[in-house]
Image (cartoon, rainbow, N blue to C red):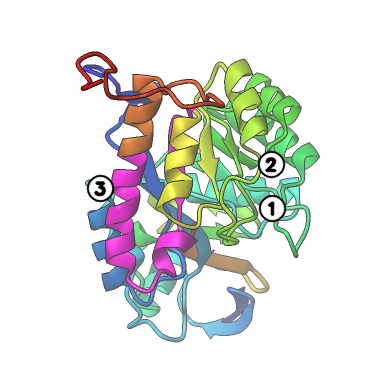
Amino acid sequence: MQDDRLIIKGIEFKSRLWVGTGKYKDFEQTAKAVEASGADVVTVAVRRVNITDRKSPNLLDYIDPKKYKILPNTAGCYTVEDALRYARLAREAGVSDMIKLEVIGDEKTLFPDTWGLLKATEILAKEGFIVFPYTNDDPVVAKRLEDAGAAAVMPLGAPIGSGLGIRNPYNIKIILEAAKVPIIVDAGVGTASDATIAMELGCDAVLINTAIAEAKDPISMAKAMKYAVIAGRLAYKAGRIPKKLYASASSPLEGMLI
Amino acid sequence: MVLIKLNGETYNTEKETLLELLSELKIIPERVVVEVNLEIIKRADLAKIKLKEGDSVEIVNFVGGG
C-alpha cells in the first residue's frame, strides 16, 4: 500500500473519492462538504450566466480551481453535437482539459445513449480532451469507450440520484477484468457501504453527488464517504477471504479443557 | 444601438464589443466563456469582436453539477 496513487494521463489524484457539486442548499454548504470529503476532483456543470441577477455568487469563488481539479460535465446533453458544444465551452474556461462526458438517451432513467457517447468520446479524445465518459454497466461498451480514447470509463452503479447502490456488481467486475484504463463508478451510490462495495470490487475511484448533497447532514455524509472509499480500497488491496459455506473456528482447539 | 439575442433573450445594447458588453453586465471575463453564433470566443479576442445586429450571444459559467 506504499504506492497506491491514482494517476490518469499523468495527472495524480490525491483521493479516490470524487464529488459532485449539484443539489446543495448553497455554495457555502457545497464548499464545506467538498472539504469534508477530502476529494480533489470536483464536478461542475456548464450553464448560462444569470444576466438579470448579477449579485448571484459564482461557484468558483467557493471551489478554488487552484486547490481542486475541476471536472466539467456535459449533463443535460442528449445529442453528440450538444455534448461537443458543452465540452468545448467548458475547456475554454481554462481550468481543465478534463470532461465528464454525458450523452443522455432517456429522460426518465438518464441512461446514456451509448452510441452517441462513443462517437463523442472519439471526437473529444482526438481534440486532446481527457475524456471520462459516463456509461452504463455494459462491459462491451466499456471496452469500446476505452478503444475510442477514454482516459477512464465511468460506469453507473444505478441511475443518477437513485441511491440504489451497485445493482450489478458482477458486470462491474467483468468491466474491471477487461479494462486497461481506470474504472470509476459514477452514479447510484446511496450510502457509505455502496461506495465501499464499489472499491472492494477493485474500482479505481467513485464519484458521488446526490448521496452526499441530499443526506440529512451532507457534511457528515461527505466524511462517511471519505472513509468508506478508503476502507474499500484497503480491503481490495488486502485481499478478502473466500466465502465458505461452513464455519472455521477462530480459536484453537488445542489446550481446551476436555 | 444593436439588437442581439443574449442567453436566449432579446437585448438592446449601445456597446460595441463583447468586452464592453460584459462590463455593462458587470461580468468578470475570467469567470465566463462567450459564444457568438455558435462560435467560441477566446478571451483575448473579446475586445476585438464587434457586436452585430441579430448576433446570438451566449455567456456561460460553471454551476453546481454532478
Name the disc covering residue A219, or none.
none
Name the disc covering residue A136, or none.
2
The alpha-carbon separation of the residues under discs 3 and 2 comes to: 27 Å
Number of other residues with Cα within 10 Å of mark 1, as a class: few under 14, some 14 to 19, many 20 or more: some
The alpha-carbon separation of the residues under discs 2 and 1 comes to: 20 Å
Q: Is residue B60 magenta?
A: no
* Nearer-the-camera pick, B32 or B41: B32
Q: Label 3 belongs to which residue?
A: A38
Q: Which residues are magenta?
A: A202-230
Q: Disc 3 on helix, strand or loop? A: loop
Which comes before the other along the chain, label 2 or label 1?
A: 1
Which comes before the other along the chain, label 3 or label 2?
A: 3
Number of other residues with Cα within 10 Å of mark 3, as a class: few under 14, some 14 to 19, many 20 or more: some
Position of residue A21 in the picture relative to residue A137 (left or right): left
* Nearer-the-camera pick, A249 or A157: A249
Which residue is at a point 24% across and 13% down the rendered structure image?
A: A254
Amino acid type at mark 1: Asp
Number of other residues with Cα within 10 Å of mark 2, as a class: few under 14, some 14 to 19, many 20 or more: many
Q: Is disc 1 on the same chain as disc 2? A: yes
Residue A234 vertical placement versus A254 (above, below):
below
Residue A55 vertical placement versus A84 (above, below):
below
Q: Label 1 belongs to which residue?
A: A82
